[in-house]
């Protein structure tokens, strides 16, 4: 039986809600202490996969802002990767500039 577009959209929406519920405590933890660049990169990699969702993008931005001056090269590269992956070529609305 074929799924309707509505059913598929509902499943995707549910996946993003579940991802947010999983990543929120991880982001809160990482932002409450200083982590290694490797740990930071792992979290940003995971968040990046879901960063087209507005709520998860806010988590991504929160982590980037928290660590901008601790690991500036790392954060700069993750902002560039986000832009390449999710933004239109003519738009830079992420708010990091």
Image: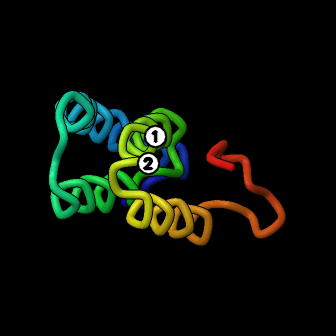
Q: Is mark 2 on a helix, strand or loop?
A: loop
Q: Mark 1 points at which residue?
A: 65
Query: What residue do we see at 31% from left, 62% from top?
Result: 45
Image coordinates of residue 29 in percent, x first then y, are 17, 31
Q: Which of the image's four quarters has the N terminus?
A: bottom left
- Classify residue 34 as left or right of residue 57: left
Q: Residue 68 carries which label?
A: 2
Image coordinates of residue 16 in percent, x first then y, are 38, 41
Q: Do the residues labelled 2 and 1 touch (CB within 8 Å)?
A: yes
The residues bearing labels 2 and 1 have C-alpha atoms spaced at a distance of 5 Å
Regarding residue 73, the answer to whether it shows in the image is yes
Is 6 located above or below residue 44 in the figure? Answer: above
User: Picture quarter containing residue 42?
Assistant: bottom left
Image coordinates of residue 61 in percent, x first then y, are 48, 41
Image coordinates of residue 2 in percent, x first then y, are 42, 60
User: Picture quarter containing residue 92?
Assistant: bottom right
């Amino acid at each position: 039986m074929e799924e309707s577009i509505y059913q598929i959209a509902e499943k995707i929406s549910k996946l993003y809600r579940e991802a947010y519920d999983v990543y929120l405590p991880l982001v809160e933890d990482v932002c409450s202490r200083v982590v290694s660049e490797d740990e930071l990169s792992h979290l940003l990699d995971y968040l990046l996969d879901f960063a087209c969702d507005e709520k998860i993008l806010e988590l991504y931005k929160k982590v980037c802002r928290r660590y901008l001056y601790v690991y500036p090269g790392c954060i700069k590269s993750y902002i560039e990767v986000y832009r390449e992956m999710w933004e239109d070529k003519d738009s830079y609305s992420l708010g990091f500039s």
